[in-house]
Amino acid sequence: MPHGVSSPLGRVVRIVDTTTGEIHEIDQGQARLKRMRRRLRAWGEQAEGLQLDYIMVTLTYRPGENWQPRHISSFLRHWRADTRLGRHVQGYAWVMELQQRGAPHYHVLLAVSKGFRIPKPDKAKLWSHGSTQVQKARSPLRYLTKYAQKLRQKADTLGFPPGARIFAVRWRDKGLAHALRGSALPAWLRRLVGPGLPAVWPSRLRGGGWLWGGQVVRSPFMFWGLGP
């Protein structure tokens, strides 16, 4: 295991369904990957129906350059802060991928205005930690599905850096962002909300629970102990 890399195996916990009494074992690492796939797919399905261009940007680290958790957020903040570039970026989805030696790199799918061409981020000094590649993506959903699958396969043997976010999705348009939010809810809460697009999504409460329809709702699942 490379230095500074966490174990690939997620902690297994036991939870009990208080409505049925059934006990389930949950691998938290696999649950994290499942949530990633659900969120990426939701973003990709939205993207397929929009009149935008999609550009895949790969961000790599040069040898000797250490990964830091704020590198990816800083890169995206540079785009938003640049008035010439940022106004053309309508949304993004990114995933972290691990090389066999355990070093991370990023695949960032930018949704941009039709015909807009971006500079290479390393040449434009938007990514100073190594090299970059830029290519047009024909099918955003297919690209995201491919990288999510690669990440799932590698996560079985490689660990992520401690504290690393492994993906993110975002839209500038408020309507798209609102629709996307449903994919972030836990499964039991999505079932409670039901199909369709509500005017207001449930909001998480500090200290536990969710505010939904003027009422506080709580998960039917409770922690029951650690797994084997």
Image: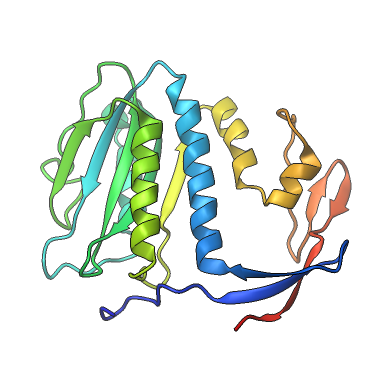
Image point 69% across, 75% down: which residue? 14
Image point 37% across, 31% down: which residue? 140
Q: The C terminus is located in which quarter?
A: bottom right
Q: Seen in the image, is 12 located left or right of residue 47?
A: right
* Res 172 seen here: no
The image shows residue 85 at horizontal and vertical percentages of: 27, 30
**Relative vertical location of residue 214 with respect to residue 216 in this rendering, above or below:** above
> Residue 145 versus residue 51: which sits nearer the camera?
145
Image point 36% across, 58% down: which residue? 153
> Residue 12 versus residue 166: which sits nearer the camera?
12
**Relative vertical location of residue 150 with respect to residue 99 in this rendering, above or below:** above
Q: Seen in the image, is 171 located left or right of residue 127?
A: right
The image shows residue 119 at horizontal and vertical percentages of: 16, 33
> Residue 216 versus residue 99: which sits nearer the camera?
99
User: Which of the 4 image quarters holds residue 134?
Assistant: top left
**Relative vertical location of residue 100 with respect to residue 138 in this rendering, above or below:** below
* Res 51 seen here: yes
The image shows residue 173 at horizontal and vertical percentages of: 51, 27
The image shows residue 78 at horizontal and vertical percentages of: 30, 44
> Residue 200 versus residue 7: which sits nearer the camera?
7
User: Which of the 4 image quarters holds residue 225?
Assistant: bottom right
Image point 31% across, 16% down: which residue? 114
